[in-house]
Image (cartoon, rainbow, N blue to C red):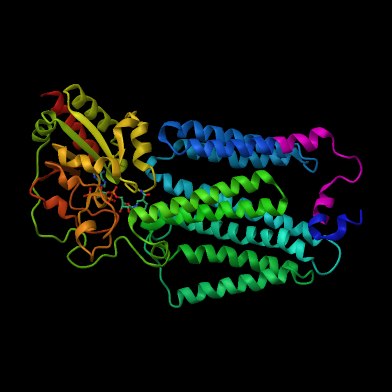
Amino acid sequence: MSRIFLSPAACLLASALPPAEPPSALQTNIPEAAYLLASLLFIFGLKRLSSPRTARSGNLVAAVGMALALGGTFLLPEMGNFGWILLAFCIGAVPGWLLAKRVKMTAMPQMVSLFNGMGGACAMFISLGEITKWEGAPGGKPSVFAVVVYAIPMLLGVVLGGISFTGSLVAFGKLQGLVSEKPLRWPAQKLINAGVVLCILAAAIGVGSFSTRTAAVIILLALALLLGVLQVLPIGGADMPVVISVLNSCTGLAAAVTGFAMQNMSMIIAGTLVGAAGSLLTVLMCKAMNRSLAKVIFGSFGGAVQGQAAAGQSDKTLREIAAAECAVMMGYARKVIIVPGYGLAVAQAQHLVHELDELLDKRGVEVKYAIHPVAGRMPGHMNVLLAEADVPYPKLLDMEEINPEFEQADVALIIGANDVVNPAARTEPSSPIYGMPILNADKAKNIIVIKRGRGTGFAGIENNLFYHPNTRMLFGDAKKALQELTTEVKAL
Ligand code: NAP
């Protein structure tokens, strides 16, 4: 027994063991086996998420992994109070299931943010629970070993989980319209944030001493929660998808360090996967928007553009086209490239696009879709939307693949897309989107744009492509415009 009391971490493990009867093989081996299998399923599931074709089954595989990990946890020797656990499970699962079922595609970013916040809260509460147990350990100063393998991961779990929890809630509020979407600024913002970080460090040191522990934990928790709010409030609503991705990696890291403190292999692996996926996604999104992460976190974007590039200030004229004329152009074309954007998602017009595609296909027109990596408001937005309408995957081509094909296209049909086809990204160094890779829709022989009016996109800037000599505007809500267009194509 004396070896067990060498470190507080070992004390925790010792306290977790039931004193009287030793656990049965079922209680010790099955949870470990379940964790191992769950970890493998997480990795396998994530691999399948890398392609739209296998993503649905990948999600299912990972969910089975999570169910296994939960089941294994129920069998742990220290588990009890099944009634309470089941009640907590239902409180989380029932609203989660209902929300996920009912959410609209356009509201998916805030949904992800809410779920991510719950993940952060879980890691935070688990770490807090571990700290509470640690308080019962005998002795004065913790050993270096205990600090490294137990205390630091546990404290990081509270801090990262807390930041992710409140940060995600603010992001949810901004996207849901509950909190102002505008970037909120106040004096000495960065200085205040740096001060909060320093206070967190001081409180973390305070947790190391038994005499100051309770007060230090409360201060640490409060400061972490505050930092999440302070970090996200100054960022504009339009940048929230990137922020959510950053917070997602933060949640993953919080879960991984908490798993490390608890020596739970499944949590370490799942947390690391989430953390790595979130970080990679953040990098990819920043690259596709040609903006550094620092600019997203510390600079405001979207709606803040001034001058002649700003929303609807151009006095140039737009050339309109009627649906009937549009139908003739497309119905007698050899090749049509459809460029879907955020407006298509807002209008929920994906099924009509597919119908139009099938009508053109029957007439012998080659139809392809050009998918920009940041079209819409979340990564993969267009892929998910079009997959929902049963558009065959081989027709969806990534930017690099489709860009050389625009020159051979008779018509580029842009539906509710704006920034992702804005040539200013290539030609205007002063533009906020300068350097962002775009779809070469301007190279097509004819360009038809479906949008409601002169509204700008996410970046809040004018798009000269709409004034291009080969461009025609089919004004209207995407759903209504596509309905008219399909009717006219049918009549050809
Ligand atoms: P966009 O630049 O935001 O433009 C959307 C266009 O759709 C608007 O100009 C709007 O014009 C039109 N629209 C809105 N509702 C419509 C409706 N019901 N029917 C028809 N048109 C409608 O969209 P995007 O080209 O897809 O570009 C995405 C932008 O989001 C990029 O700037 C990207 O950097 C940013 N972003 C993307 C992600 C991501 O992960 N995908 C994340 C963060 C930021 P009207 O008002 O005139 O109709």
328 shown above or below 128: above
Q: Please report the residue visible at 28 percent of the width from the left and 52 percent of the height from the top.
A: 437
Q: Quadrant of residue 223?
A: bottom right
Q: Quadrant of residue 345?
A: top left
382 shown above or below 162: above
Query: Which span of residues is magenta-colored?
Result: 11-33
Relative horizontal placement of residue 236, taking residue 331 as reference (left or right): right
Relative horizontal placement of residue 151, taking residue 119 as reference (left or right): right
Dominant SS type (magenta): helix
Does residue 475 appear in the picture of this structure? Answer: no
Q: Quadrant of the C terminus?
A: top left
381 shown above or below 296: above
Q: Please report the residue visible at 73 percent of the width from the left and 55 percent of the height from the top.
A: 130
Relative horizontal placement of residue 404, taking residue 398 as reference (left or right): left
Give percent across and percent down for residue 300: 36, 65
Magenta span contains residue 427: no
Q: Please report the residue visible at 20 percent of the width from the left and 54 percent of the height from the top.
A: 423
Give percent across and percent down for residue 76: 77, 40
Q: Please report the residue visible at 32 percent of the width from the left and 30 percent of the height from the top.
A: 391
Of 392 and 132, the residue lying toward us: 392
